[in-house]
Image (cartoon, grey):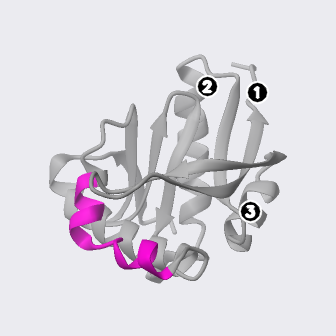
């Protein structure tokens, strides 16, 4: 995948991010959550969520097309999604490595990632990349402004970043 470039997201990347996020969320979580929760995860819902002020948003691009993204907030990898056509190709590995580099440069020593219980593919991915499962706890999930707050059991993963320069 030498034709893949990782860079900071641009405003023009928003619709590509939204499409990948919606597709990926439904692929990974649609069967884990109550049907009424999954039904509310519409394109407009993901557009609202994509407007959230992340600390940093990186995209993986092939030519000008966004094929994956990773969102950072504080010491946390908040979101990581790769489009169907690029899954299993190493794009997620490269996005995670770029995010870890950015966090280390920002002085973060321990990265946190949360993953829904039942999302085995993501859990295995994080473990393969050196993240330790720090336990499961019920965490609030993102809801629309008119929706009651809900929680869901989430794995918490931590990884200590190298302090070598």
Assess disc 3: are there few (<14), some (14-19) or many (≥20) residues with their C-alpha within 10 Å of its C-alpha: many
Residue indicated by mark 3: 123
Q: Where is residue 4 in the image (x, y as percent from the top left)?
A: 43, 62
Q: Do the residues labelled 1 and 2 touch (CB within 8 Å)?
A: yes
In the image, the segment drawn in magenta is 35-48
Front tag of 3 and 2: 3
Magenta segment main secondary structure = helix
Find the residue positioned furthest to the front: 148
Q: Which quadrant of the view contains residue 44?
A: bottom left
Element on which disc 3 rests? helix
Q: Is residue 66 left or right of residue 130?
A: left
Q: Residue at x 62, y 48 (%)?
A: 139
Q: Where is residue 156 in the image (x, y as percent from the top left)?
A: 73, 46
Element on which disc 2 rests? helix
Q: Which residue is drawn at 57% across and 61% down?
A: 92
Q: Is residue 144 left or right of residue 150?
A: left
Query: Is tag 3's residue or tag 2's residue first in the polypeptide sequence?
Result: 2
Residue indicated by mark 1: 162
Find the residue positioned furthest to the left: 12
Residue indicated by mark 2: 104
Q: Which residue is drawn at 37% across and 71% down?
A: 22
């Amino acid at each position: 995948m030498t034709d893949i470039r990782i860079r900071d997201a641009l405003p023009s990347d928003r619709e590509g991010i939204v499409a990948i996020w919606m597709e990926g969320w439904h692929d990974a979580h649609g069967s884990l959550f109550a049907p009424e929760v999954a039904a509310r995860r519409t394109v407009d819902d993901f557009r609202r969520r994509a407007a959230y002020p992340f600390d940093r948003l990186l995209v993986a691009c092939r030519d000008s097309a966004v094929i994956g993204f990773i969102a950072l907030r504080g010491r946390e990898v908040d979101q990581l999604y790769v489009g169907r056509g690029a899954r299993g190709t190493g794009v997620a590995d490269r996005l995670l490595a770029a995010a870890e580099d950015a966090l280390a440069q920002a002085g973060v020593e321990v990265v946190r990632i949360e993953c829904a219980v039942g999302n085995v593919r993501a859990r295995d991915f994080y473990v393969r990349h050196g993240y330790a499962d720090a336990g499961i706890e019920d965490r609030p999930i993102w809801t629309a402004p008119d929706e009651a707050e809900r929680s869901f059991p989430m794995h918490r993963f931590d990884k200590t970043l190298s302090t070598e320069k």
